[in-house]
Amino acid sequence: MAKKSTPKTSTRKAPWKRSNPRKRAGKASKHLTPAKKAAAKASAKRAGRPYPNLVDNMRMAKSAKKTAKKSAKKATKKTAKKTTKKKSARKTTKKAAKKKTARKAEKDPKGGLTAAGRKAFAKKDGAHLKPGVTKKASEMTPTEMRRKGSWAVRFYGRAKLPPLVDSEGRPTRHALSAHAWGEPVPKTVAAARKIAARGERLLERYRKAKKRA
């Protein structure tokens, strides 16, 4: 015959029969906040008791711990998020600084592009840019005459010229392009038109040389 199973009874003492664990550990007792006291009173009232008992107070103390844990968890997440944002911002700043340095290295401060700048354009747009022609007109090949003449007319022969100097009187990048082609940097419209006129003469010489050939 099978034995009848007897229901297990809890051997744990009721909370009011146990000594305060904080007192046993030699720690000072913690008191409920006014808000938790009010919540304990409301809990007792719902249960039909005029005053909160130990269980009500313990429940409120436990919920306070949970709230504190949640707050600590939220604070940790917030700090981690801020740290991630700061790291991302630093990375972005570094990338931007790197790009700026690279762009600076691509431009010749005296005017025009550096070899690195021409290489960057070739990589980006497939353009095959060459250095400006700085030779004397008498030493130029017909192709070089055509190149320099075309550049001079295109840059300084247009109806409306871009600004040649900035607000502080310094030559703009448009004006500095002349240096890359062996021409004096123009600061006035008249100086720019002179370069365009020389360009027209070079193109005329190129056309004559092409006819002879």
Image: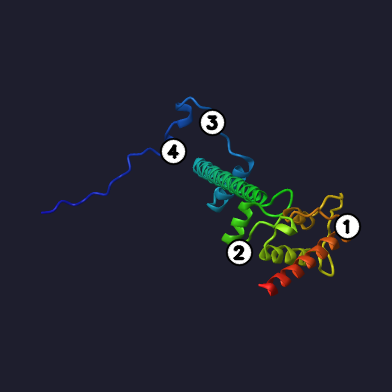
Q: How far apart are the alpha carbons under marks 2 and 4? A: 84 Å
Q: How far apart are the alpha carbons under marks 1 and 4? A: 96 Å
Report which residue position mark 1 lands on: 188
Query: Residue 29: which disc?
Result: 3
Residue furthest to the left in view is 1
Report which residue position mark 4 lands on: 15
Category of crowding for the residue at label 4, using alpha-carbon neighbours closer than 10 angstroms: few (below 14), some (14–19), many (at least 20): few
Q: Amino acid at mark 3?
A: Ser
Report which residue position mark 2 lands on: 127
Classify residue 121 as left or right of residue 110. Answer: left
Q: Amino acid at mark 2?
A: Ala
Query: Residue at point 77% right, 56% down?
Result: 178
Nearest the camera: 26 or 164?
164
Q: Earlier in the sequence, mark 2 or mark 4?
A: 4
Query: Residue at point 33% right, 43% down?
Result: 10
Nearest the camera: 174 or 68?
174
Q: Pinpoint residue 9: horizontal percent, then vertical percent.
A: 30, 45
- Residue at disc 4, secondary structure: helix
Q: Pinpoint residue 58: horizontal percent, then vertical percent.
A: 50, 41
Query: Residue at point 48% right, 24% down?
Result: 26
